[in-house]
C-alpha cells in the first residue's frame, strides 16, 4: 500500500522518497517491521492466550521435560501470520500475482491450522480437525495455485529465441549510457511448464515430458492434471512435515526461517535479469517482488524464536506450522525450484520420512512376523534423539546447523549449474 502512496506523491519530489521503488529497501523495511510486530505485540498476544487458558495439552510419551510444557500457550502462529501479512500488505506491490498467491496461501493454511487448534483447545478433542478436511483444504489450495500458474497470462518465463536450426538468435542493441553497440540474445516471454533441475547445466524439467505419449488434443488437459497432482503432493508433504517438526522448542521456527532465507535468495536472483543470465538460471519477470514477502516471513519466524526458544513461552500450533510449511512449498513452486525442496527443506523432509518409514516398517513386520518392529526409538526423528538422552536444546541446535549446511548447498547449486 505504501508503494502506491509513493506513486501518488512522487511528483512532489520529496527527498529520499524514490527509495520506495527499490525492492531491496522495501524488503529491508518488511523484515524490520515484521520483527517489531513480533517482539512488541508477541508478548501481549501470549498474555491474551494465557488469560483465555489456551494451553498445550501434552500426552505423556516418557520424554524428558515433556510434562513441564503442559499449559504453555499454543496458537502462537497468530503472531507469525500477522507479522507476515501486515508488512507484505504495506510494502509489496499488490498488483503482483505472485504476492497474492502467497497471501492466499498464508491465510488459507493459517485458517485451517487455526480451526484445528480451536477444536483441540476449546472442544477438548485431541484429534483436532479431521484429516480428510485438512487434505481437502490443501487440495483446494493446490487447485488455486495450479490454475493461476498454469493459466494466468502474467505468469511467464523469459527464454532465448532459437532459429530453425536450434541456434540462439542475437541482436545488436545500443547502450543508452555509453552509446556502444552491444550484442544480446533475443528473448521473449512465454508460458512454460518447466522447472529447474539442480546441479545440471542448461537443463530444465518440463512437466509435458510426462504426458508426451498422449495425443496432442489431450496434452494440455493431461499436463494440467499432472501439474495439479504434483503441486498437491508438494503442498501436503511440506506443510505436514513442518507440522511434525514442530515438536521441540524453536525447531520448526528456526529451520523454516533458514529455508525461507534460501528461497529469498533464489527468488531475488531468479528475478534479476543480469544475475539470472550470469548464473544461467531461468529468469522469471516480476518474481523479485517476492523478496518483500519472504523478508516478512524471515522476520516473523526469527521474531517468534524470541518467545519460542527453549524454554518456550508459546507454541505456534497448527496455526503456524501448517501455514509455514505451505508457504515454503508454494514459494518454491512459484520460483520453479520445487525439485530442490529435499535439499533446502532437508530437515523437514527427514522428519516426515522418519514417520513414514517407522509406520510402514512397523506394519510390514507385524504382518510378516506377527510383532511390529521399529527403525527409530520414536518418530518423528527429533524424538528418537530425545530417547537416546540428548537434551532438547542440543537437538534443536544441531538440526539448525544441518539446515544451514543444506541451505548453503542449495545456493551453491546455482554456481554448479
Image: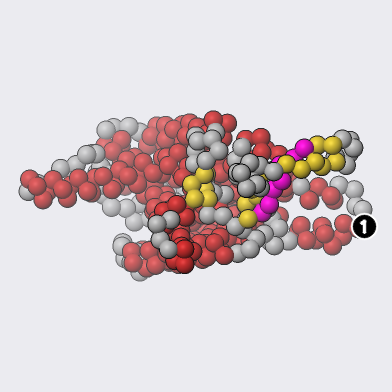
Residue drawn at x 54%, y 30% is 416
In magenta stretch: residue 185 = yes
Q: Residue 7 appears at what percent x and percent y?
A: 82, 59
Q: Residue 120 appears at what percent x and percent y?
A: 36, 63
Which quarter of the picture shows residue 11? Answer: bottom right
Furthest toward the left, the residue is 370
Direction from residue 219 to residue 6 in the image, left or right: right
Direction from residue 206 to residue 356 in the image, left or right: left
Helix, strand or loop for the magenta stretch, by majority = strand
Q: Residue 134 appears at what percent x and percent y?
A: 38, 64
Structural crowding at the residue carrying mark 1, measured as other residues with C-alpha within 10 Å and reported as few (<14), some (14–19) or many (≥20): few
The magenta segment: 183-189
Residue drawn at x 49%, y 41% is 197
The quarter in which the C terminus is drawn is top right
The quarter in which the N terminus is drawn is bottom right
Q: Which one is in front, 312 or 288?
A: 288
Amino acid at each position: 500500500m505504501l508503494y502506491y502512496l509513493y506513486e501518488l506523491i512522487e511528483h512532489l519530489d520529496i527527498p529520499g522518497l524514490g527509495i520506495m521503488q527499490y525492492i531491496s529497501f522495501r524488503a529491508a523495511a518488511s523484515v524490520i517491521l515484521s520483527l517489531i510486530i513480533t517482539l512488541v505485540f508477541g508478548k501481549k498476544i501470549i498474555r491474551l492466550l494465557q488469560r483465555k487458558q489456551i494451553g498445550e495439552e501434552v500426552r505423556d510419551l516418557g520424554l524428558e521435560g515433556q510434562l513441564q510444557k503442559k499449559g504453555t500457550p499454543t496458537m502462537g502462529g497468530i503472531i507469525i501470520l500477522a507479522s507476515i501479512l501486515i508488512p507484505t500488505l504495506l510494502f509489496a506491490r499488490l498488483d503482483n500475482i505472485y504476492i497474492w498467491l502467497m497471501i492466499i496461501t498464508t491465510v488459507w493454511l493459517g485458517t485451517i491450522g487455526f480451526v484445528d487448534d480451536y477444536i483441540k483447545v476449546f472442544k477438548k478433542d485431541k484429534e483436532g480437525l479431521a484429516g480428510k478436511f485438512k487434505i481437502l483444504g490443501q487440495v483446494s489450495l493446490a487447485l488455486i495455485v495450479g490454475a493461476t500458474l498454469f493459466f494466468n497470462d502474467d505468469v511467464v518465463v523469459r527464454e532465448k529465441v532459437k532459429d530453425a536450426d536450434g541456434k540462439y538468435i542475437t541482436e545488436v542493441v545500443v547502450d543508452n549510457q555509453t552509446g556502444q553497440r552491444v550484442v544480446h540474445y533475443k528473448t521473449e516471454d512465454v508460458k512454460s511448464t518447466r522447472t529447474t533441475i539442480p546441479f545440471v547445466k542448461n537443463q530444465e524439467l518440463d512437466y509435458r515430458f510426462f504426458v508426451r505419449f498422449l495425443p496432442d488434443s489431450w496434452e494440455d488437459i493431461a499436463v494440467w492434471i499432472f501439474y495439479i497432482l504434483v503441486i498437491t503432493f508438494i503442498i501436503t508433504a511440506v506443510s505436514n512435515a513442518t507440522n511434525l517438526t514442530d515438536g521441540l522448542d524453536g525447531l520448526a521456527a528456526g529451520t523454516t526461517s533458514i529455508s525461507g532465507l534460501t528461497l529469498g535468495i533464489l527468488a531475488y536472483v531468479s528475478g534479476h535479469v543480469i544475475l539470472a543470465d550470469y548464473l544461467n538460471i531461468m529468469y522469471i519477470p516480476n518474481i523479485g517482488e517476492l523478496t518483500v514477502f519472504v523478508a516478512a516471513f524471515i522476520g516473523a519466524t526469527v521474531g517468534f524464536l524470541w518467545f519460542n526458544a527453549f524454554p518456550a513461552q508459546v507454541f505456534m500450533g497448527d496455526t503456524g506450522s501448517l501455514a509455514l510449511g505451505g508457504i515454503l512449498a508454494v514459494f518454491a513452486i512459484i520460483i520453479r525450484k520445487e525439485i530442490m525442496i529435499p535439499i533446502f527443506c532437508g530437515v523437514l523432509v527427514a522428519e516426515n520420512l522418519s514417520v513414514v518409514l517407522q509406520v510402514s516398517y512397523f506394519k510390514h513386520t507385524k504382518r510378516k512376523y506377527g510383532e511390529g518392529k521399529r527403525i527409530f526409538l520414536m518418530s518423528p526423528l527429533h524424538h528418537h534423539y530425545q530417547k537416546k538422552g540428548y537434551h532438547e536444546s542440543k537437538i534443536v541446535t544441531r538440526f539448525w546447523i544441518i539446515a544451514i549446511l543444506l541451505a548453503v548447498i542449495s545456493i551453491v547449486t546455482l554456481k554448479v549449474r
